[in-house]
Image (cartoon, rainbow, N blue to C red):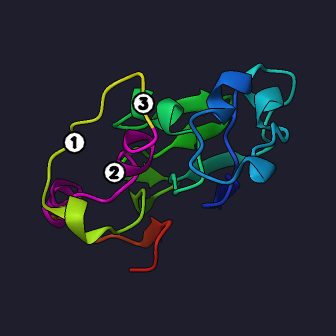
Amino acid sequence: AKKCNAIRALRKVRNPDDLACMACPVKYREMNTFYKYFSGQKKAPVLTLYVAGNHEASNYHMELFHGGWVAPNIYYMGHANVLNVCGIRIAGLSGIYKRNHFHQGFHEKLPLNDGTMRSIYHVRETDVFRLLQVAEPIDVFISHDWP
């Protein structure tokens, strides 16, 4: 039997430049250990899926808007996505709800400034709409924010 692991909380920082794109107090901006997975020094022992939140390196997740592999065995689900993993349909919605951005489209571009490094992780109506178009049943839903 295949082992599957779905989680939602990781601090994904590849390098010191990513720290500048984290919307959190400076005292919380730490490299931690993700860079070891990103560089290939370490490998996650099982498939690990995640959605992004509000204290992430916004620039990194912007590069993978629709999701993608961030390291061996670690997959970012993108802003809104559904994956079939080990026969389990897993939906993911990244970000947090912010009323004044919900009805807007994405407008952020690199380099991010203090405002756009925050607005990029706000859930948009288009993200929710995309997930509502899924006809097949969802077994697991992962979000950073409460539903």
Residue 68 relative to residue 116: left or right: right
Which residue is depicted at the point 68% across and 29% down? 72
Callout 1 secondary element: loop
Lower sequence index among marks 2 and 3 = 2
**Residue drawn at (37%, 41%) of the image:** 116
* Residue that protrudes farthest toward the bottom in the picture: 147
- Region rendered in magenta: 114-133
**Local secondary structure at mark 3:** loop
Q: Who comes first in sequence, dot 3 or dot 1?
A: 1
Q: How many marks?
A: 3
Q: Position of residue 14 (x, y in %)?
A: 70, 27
Q: Main secondary structure of the magenta part?
A: helix
Query: Is residue 35 found left or right of 94 in the rendered image?
Result: right
Identify the residue position indicated by label 3 in the image.
112
Instruction: Kindly report the distance in space between the C-alpha atoms of the residues bearing marks 1 and 2.
Output: 16 Å
Tell me what residue is drawn at x 41 percent, y 33 percent.
Answer: 62
Give the amino acid at mark 3.
Leu
Q: Position of residue 44 (x, y in %)?
A: 78, 40
Query: Could you say which is closer to the camera, residue 135 or residue 79?
Result: 79
Task: Give the distance between the C-alpha atoms of the residues marked 2 and 3, in whole angstroms.
Answer: 24 Å
Q: Is residue 124 magenta?
A: yes
Q: Is residue 131 visible?
A: no
Q: Which residue is mark 2?
A: 81
Which label lies toward us, 2 or 3? 3
Q: Secondary structure at mark 2?
A: strand
